[in-house]
Image (cartoon, rainbow, N blue to C red):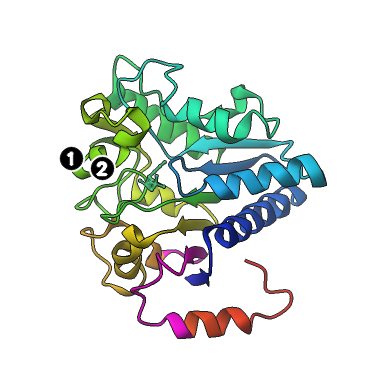
Amino acid sequence: MEVVLLPTPEDCGRVVADAVAGSVLAALGRGGPVVLGLATGSSPLLAYRELLRRHREEGLSFDGVEAFLLDEYVGLPAGHPESYREVIRRELTDELGLDPAVVHGPDGAAADPLQAAHDYEDRLLAAGPVAVQVLGIGANGHLGFNEPGSSLASRTRVKTLTEQTRIDNARFFGDDVTAVPRHVITQGLGTILGAEHLVLVATGEAKAAAIAAAVEGPLTASCPASVLQLHRHVTLVVDEAAGAQLTRADYYRYVLSHKLTDQGW
Ligand code: F6R
């Protein structure tokens, strides 16, 4: 796993945008449909803004790309402003010129969410593999909404959020924890591992313990993000605050400053 330790969240946003654009453009260059995996939440927002800037000012085009979301709340009606489909449309895909018809997410409003989760896994497998998957991380080490204890081999399914995750996400619901759904449909850890390139971004000290556990701790369901250690192509982008508990920080900086010219992300 490549750990990219950078001074500021803005630097992280630029590198994540580089890594995502690089993998998408390379996949488009190979021909055929390209799948981009998207996370929601605060962590990727600066990267999404940077992608939009490049789209506006530098002609970066994602024509031919289909997007698949990592997860969705169960029980919010379609079109709810905090449903992840709506959030991603607002924050990225509309302005990037992606037709809503090619932006897919689990159907959290379905009458049968268990079946909707299976259906989403099938749709993703049929469209995939995901060329590049953007990821955030929870302060408890969750990846997608695979809370601690999730099977490292899990596939897309319904999960129950921890109370802490609901509290963390209440900021998007007017600070009303009771408005945050209890259940979600999330890609499983095994599903996420199927992507060709994983790009995780984390900023701020609240993520420092989770990042250290994911990168340098044991492979364990108690820190779902430690499953990244099994993947062959991970770019993990953190600012100094989120990287503060990494014991090999000096080595990661050394590797970064000695990257070969064409090494890419
Ligand atoms: C969002 C997701 C979550 C978030 C994580 C961090 O689609 O899957 O794993 O990435 O909860 O959230 P933020 O970035 O808001 O701190």
Seen from the viewer's position, the closer of residues 70 and 244 is: 244
Whether 121 is drawn above or below 245: the answer is: above
Pointer 2 residue: 165
Residue 149 seen by the camera: yes
Main SS category, magenta section: loop
Write down the region rendered in magenta. 231-250
State the separation of the CA atoms marked 1 and 2: 5 Å
Percent position of residue 160, x then y: 21, 36
Q: Residues within 10 Å of mark 2 (few under 14, many from 20)?
A: some
Whether 56 is drawn above or below 230: the answer is: above
Q: Quadrant of residue 74?
A: top left
Percent position of residue 37, x then y: 53, 43
Report whether 63 appears left or right of 258. Answer: right
Seen from the viewer's position, the closer of residues 129 and 209 is: 209
Report whether 183 appears left or right of 60. Answer: left
Give the quarter of the figure containing the C terminus.
bottom right
Residue at 33% over, 28% down:
173
What SS does tag 2 mark?
helix
In the rendered image, residue 32 lying in the magenta stretch gets the answer no
Pointer 1 residue: 163
Q: Quadrant of residue 70?
A: top left
Residue type beneath disc 2 = Thr
Ligand 1 within 8 angstroms of badge 2 C-beta:
yes
Seen from the viewer's position, the closer of residues 142 and 245 is: 245
| Disc number for residue 74 | none
Percent position of residue 150, x then y: 23, 50
Residue at 28% over, 72% down:
217
Report whether 88 appears left or right of 84. Answer: right
Percent position of residue 127, x then y: 56, 36
Residue type beneath disc 1 = Glu
Residue at 52% over, 58% down:
9
What SS does tag 1 mark?
helix
